[in-house]
Each structure stands twice: as structure tokens, then as C-alpha cells.
Image: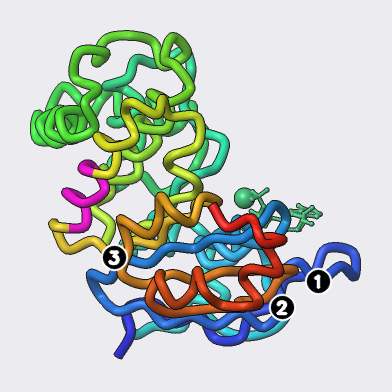
Amino acid sequence: MALLDIQSIEVEFDGFRAVDRVSLALEAGELVGLAGTNGAGKSTVFGAVAGQVAITRGAIRFAGQDITRLPAHRRASMGLGRTFQVPREFGSLSVLDNLLAASPDEGHESLLAAWFARASARQTDGRLTERADELLGLTRLSALRGQPASALSGGQKKLLELARAMMRAPTCLLLDEPFAGVNPVLIDQLIEVLRAIHARGVALIVIEHHLQALKSLVPRLLVMDQGQVIADGAPAAVLDDARVRTAYMGGVV
Ligand SMILES: Nc1ncnc2c1ncn2[C@@H]1O[C@H](COP(=O)(O)OP(=O)(O)OP(=O)(O)O)[C@@H](O)[C@H]1O
Ligand SMILES: [Mg+2]
């Protein structure tokens, strides 16, 4: 049985079908790339799976349960995590506190509630800080631990977003363009970070425009175009696919 089973989902915005009968079965510990041109519907699929976006048709199962109608925080506490294309850090909090505010028992997205809950928990629960520090090490942010998150570069914010998602010990992570805005010099490091997360048994779906970057990371690649999955398979075969080439107007990069 698949860990995540997306069954022919549709999402409509004012009659516009942004996601059109998308299906994907992801096994535990699997690593999959999701590519496609701007507006193809990739982020909307993540929103539908993580619970920020309502679907108009289809069903989503996770860890053996129908989660189609569960609120986002329930899905997160089941081990289904995500990052956002535009990072959602709490700018005035330190890098460390951003992680503590995203800890496993945090069941909602309210900044203040999260912060006050953590502020008291911090004094009693050193394990959370230990976990946060371990993840800051993994994402190479340890040196910035005490800095306000607002002081981070765009690429560092992407890394922080990743570390925050890992605080909840997910079994499945949806990563929305983790490479975007990251200095090319750090891309190889980031690939190592993603491999390390994957090596811990976390199933990953990674959105990225650049097919070549995905090719070296994932053994399975999906491409979306105009709301639909137009290819799903080994990267070499997908890059060769006529529909993919047409969608990328011959400029497969
Ligand atoms: N909240 C919304 N309301 C209305 N339309 C939306 C909304 N979110 C997304 N869309 C539309 O749905 C389509 C898919 O958007 P989505 O963000 O999922 O694409 P994407 O594949 O992630 O693109 P990109 O690579 O540019 O991030 C686009 O046409 C977009 O304008
Ligand atoms: Mg997107």
C-alpha cells in the first residue's frame, strides 16, 4: 500500500481547473521529482495534499487513512509535511526559535500561540532544542542560530523552511522549489541535505523547474502541464518524452 495515494484530484478556482485529474502513488521512503512550466499546477497539488487548498473531485489517502477532508494541521501531525515556494519564516524570531515554533506538537499556524507555547516549553524540554540544533547542523545553519530570521538571505530562508518542516519528524515531505534562490555554489550542498533527509527514510516530492537538476537527484520524475500529469517515470525517459518536450517548447533544461 502506498504511503501517499493521490486519486484523480481536481482543483478549480472560479471555474478555472488548475489541477485536472492528478493521480500519484508514493511509496514510503520514495523520492520523486515534480516538474512543469509556470502555472502547471504543481504548488496547487501540494496545497491540496497538505490541506491548504480544497479539492473539487477525487480523494487523498495518507498512511492508510482517507485525509481528503482533514484540516491541514491534522495532516501535518500525521507526518505529512510541506515547505512553501515563498518561505514563511517568522522574521522577528531567531533562527532557533523558528524551529522551536514549528515543533511536533504544534497543531496550528498561529504565530503568537505557537510562540508563547514554545517559550514556556523551551525551559522544560531541552530535547526540542537538541532536535532543533541537530537540524540546524543538517541544514548548515548552526552559525546563524541566534540571528533573527529576517536577516537571512533568500537561500538561507529556504534552508530554514526545510529545517522547520523537519521539526515535526515527517514521514513524507513536499518540498516546493527548495533550490529556488539558492546560490548555485550551495546547490550541491543542498542536494546532499536532501539526500540525507531521504536517507532517514522520509519520502520526498521535490518541485523544481530545472529538469536536469532533478535528474541527478531523483529516480522518478513527474511532469505537469496545464493541470495534468503528462509524464511519470525514469528521468531519462521523461526528458525524452514528446509531450514533455512540447510543454517545454523544446527547451528542456
Ligand atoms: N489561490 C488561487 N486563486 C486563483 N488561481 C490560482 C490560485 N492559486 C493558483 N492559481 C492558478 O492556478 C494555476 C496553477 O498555479 P500553481 O501555483 O499551482 O502553478 P505552479 O506549477 O506551482 O507554477 P510555478 O512554477 O510558477 O510556481 C495558475 O494558473 C495559477 O494562476
Ligand atoms: Mg509553484
Q: Is residue 75 left or right of residue 131?
A: right
Q: Is residue 185 left or right of residue 221?
A: left
- Amino acid marked by disc 1: Arg
Q: What element does badge 1 sit on? A: strand
- Amino acid marked by disc 2: Asp
Q: Is residue 211 above or below residue 99?
A: below
Q: Position of residue 247 (x, y in %)?
A: 70, 66
User: Mark 2 and mark 1 in contact (Cβ < 8 Å)?
Assistant: yes
Query: Which residue is under mark 1?
Result: 17
Q: Nearer the viewer, residue 83 or 246?
A: 246
Q: Say which mark, if any, is on residue 72.
A: none
Q: Which residues are magenta?
A: 192-198
Residue 40 occupies which quadrant of the picture?
bottom right
Per the model, the C-alpha gap separating discs 3 and 1 is 28 Å
Query: Which residue is under mark 3?
Result: 203
Predominant secondary structure in magenta? Answer: helix
Q: Say which mark, if any, is on residue 20.
A: 2
Q: Tell which circle, 3 or 1, labels the residue nearer the N-terminal end.
A: 1
Q: Tell which circle, 3 or 2, labels the residue nearer the N-terminal end.
A: 2
